[in-house]
Amino acid sequence: MRISGPASGYDGIWRIVPEDHLSDSMDIADDATRPVAKARGGRTAPTIYDIAALAGVNPSTVSRALSKPGRVSATTQKKVEDAAAQLHYQVNVFARALPTGRTNTIGLIVSDITNPAFFEVIRGAEAAAAERDYTLVLAESAESAEGELTAAQRMLATVDGIVLASPRLSDEQIRALAAQKPAAVINRRVEGVDSLVADTDAGVTDAVRHLASLGHTSLAYVAGPERSWMSARRWESIKARCDWSGMSATVVASGVPTLDGGRRAAAAVRASVATAVFCYNDLMAIGLMRELQGAGVRIPSDLSILGFDNIFGSDFTTPPLSTIKSPLRESGVAAVQRILEELDQPRTAFESPSLVTELVLRGSTGPVGR
Amino acid sequence: MRISGPASGYDGIWRIVPEDHLSDSMDIADDATRPVAKARGGRTAPTIYDIAALAGVNPSTVSRALSKPGRVSATTQKKVEDAAAQLHYQVNVFARALPTGRTNTIGLIVSDITNPAFFEVIRGAEAAAAERDYTLVLAESAESAEGELTAAQRMLATVDGIVLASPRLSDEQIRALAAQKPAAVINRRVEGVDSLVADTDAGVTDAVRHLASLGHTSLAYVAGPERSWMSARRWESIKARCDWSGMSATVVASGVPTLDGGRRAAAAVRASVATAVFCYNDLMAIGLMRELQGAGVRIPSDLSILGFDNIFGSDFTTPPLSTIKSPLRESGVAAVQRILEELDQPRTAFESPSLVTELVLRGSTGPVGR
DNA sequence: TTGTATGCGTTATCAA
DNA sequence: TTGATAACGCATACAA
């Protein structure tokens, strides 16, 4: 059991501060030396008491003026704002969080911070949060369900709501998390929890049709992690489409959704009869392609390869990777917007936005060889 | 001027939560439903008062037992810990930060969260922070000096120390920041501020020697942002080495340190007489290479290209990029360790660790053509 | 070693 | 509309 104390005060949290989109409303650029609470020089930050004294009103009035505009007369509102500006007042987030429990912060947990697939999810979520003056809080679970749960649990103590991107947790665990604070899940459907899931069928249908037109009749799927809901969905979608088209499809391997996972699937892929292979994501597709090319396999003439997501770098390869693009940014935006909605008025009905995938044809797919 | 209030409560901060390295000391994996402060169900988190009541001691004793081990008798220490464990107690970070001003948090500002070059800096910094039970806080400045200053300024209010990676700020601004709380700078030398800078000469020397042995006599350098201290350093290093070797070297362009910045430098590179070109970073090198290849230039037979950093994806290209690897992770680790040192005992002398670059030869460099 | 009392900066409740 | 005052949870100076 974890207890507090210096040796366990670490809550495993990183934070990221993007450029302030409200910069037009500030002028601190010429003054990097105004006081910060408990700063080095011993100077202390101005409080609402200082503002109150300067404006000639009560501190509680200052609090109202600054946090609940409209609950105070126009004249005192101005007096307070002027005084606050003059003192370079900045609210103490700790003091505010203490009585309210609110931090104007939303958590986002991704499984791997170095996976470019999450770039856009993060940026989308950040933009949606910033739009409403909220702060985004990221978590990395290192592809481990256990790490994910502890990260989420800790995060929950300091955020107003939480977004889980491609979680590895069980449905039950996710529901338990969602019971505590507003939550949303990306890339996975969980009964009873607001879920943002892209329609993979659209992209897969186009991809299979494309492969069929190229003469392929035997496909393979290099699966992602066993616990990945989305990996299962992608396989289902591929299988269904192949059945419909009269093509054969098999799962050849399963592993970590990284470059290395893709490399390790190379042997199994070569052993199969497939002439075209889908990979769970672009990272695996690139790893597979490079491993195969190293062994003399020509892409796409000997084998066609397709990925999912369309990440940074997927067009660096030779040939550039054909892939099924996911609405990553849109998912991040929608998830945060949903949390914000719940925060504004709890218990409103969730209406999932339409999120569609799209086939991006580049060079790694071609006519069936020989 | 910025004032507090709901419409401006956003402090532009994201947070990232990595897997907890202390997971062996906890057992919450089977219990995702214990109370969180101000949770949905209305349940409230246990406080030191609850622990005090259960252990039969005073709350202040609980506080001491949990935050300053050794200042309390062994028996009460155990009583308190047991009670805390039984209640699943988790310290309220806001309440702790209020009187102390300490958050056990260290800030890190990078210019672009999607630049893979920062992956290792981030992971290194995170690891060093986690090692000491500190939390890492990230900031993105979007390559803008102004955004960087506001991000840093805000971050300063909630962290114990700050790390600036490749900052675009002026030396003066950086010093002003460092005057407020412990600070460290990565990839740049700032007088009066602890700086972590890799020795570029080592890698450059090897690279120029390598190019000379391949018959090159005329080099070019595609510079990074004008305000980039490191870009200037790299150019100096290249120029000095070329002078020494009797080779000519020119700066052909300057721009944003991204794929696009590299692409835009293509025309200038073609117009130059150089047969080998260094780029400020791998991102630019890849952008340049792809743009050139699209125009029919063969790499490396028509032109040799070198990058800096050795980022994710730099080996995806054809040919794979030759580059000068930077000690990214080590820089992140060292910067955080330095901050921690300052926090432990202020005003200790700073001893910079040795950080060396290294030439990584791949396929983008070859014998001078024709 | 432990208990008492007070402060940290803000919000919220209640009167005026 | 505004002012006085009591939480919020923890740390700490001081007293015992």
Image (cartoon, coloured by chain):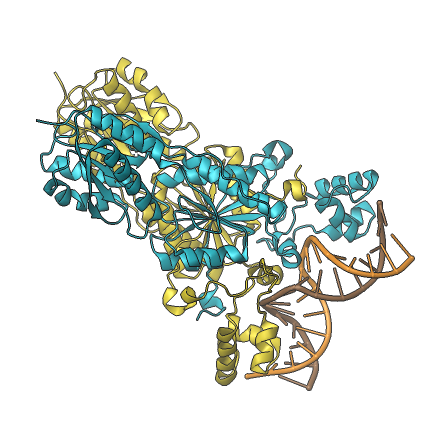
Chain colours: A cyan, B yellow, C orange, D brown
In the picture, the quarter occupied by the N terminus of chain B is top right
The reply, left or right, for residue A23 in relation to residue B260 is right
Tell me if residue B68 can be seen: no
Task: Give the quarter of the image for residue B6.
Answer: top right
- Residue D10 in percent (x, y) is at 58, 67
Residue B26 in view in this figure: yes
Residue at 31% from the left image edge and 39% from the top image edge: A237
Residue B4: horizontal and vertical position, in percent? Answer: 67, 44
Q: Position of residue A277 (x, y in %)?
A: 20, 36
Query: In the image, is A245 to the left or to the right of B110?
Result: left
Q: Nearer the viewer, residue B344 or A284?
A: A284
Given the current orientation, which residue lies at the most extreme top position?
A: B271
Q: Quadrant of residue B357?
A: top left
Q: Quadrant of residue C4?
A: bottom right
- Residue B228 versus residue B22: which sits nearer the camera? B22
Identity of the residue drawn at 40% across and 39% down: A119
Is B273 or B288 nearer to us in this picture?
B288
The spot of residue A27 in percent (x, y) is 63, 34
Residue A189 lies left or right of residue A351; in this view the side is: left
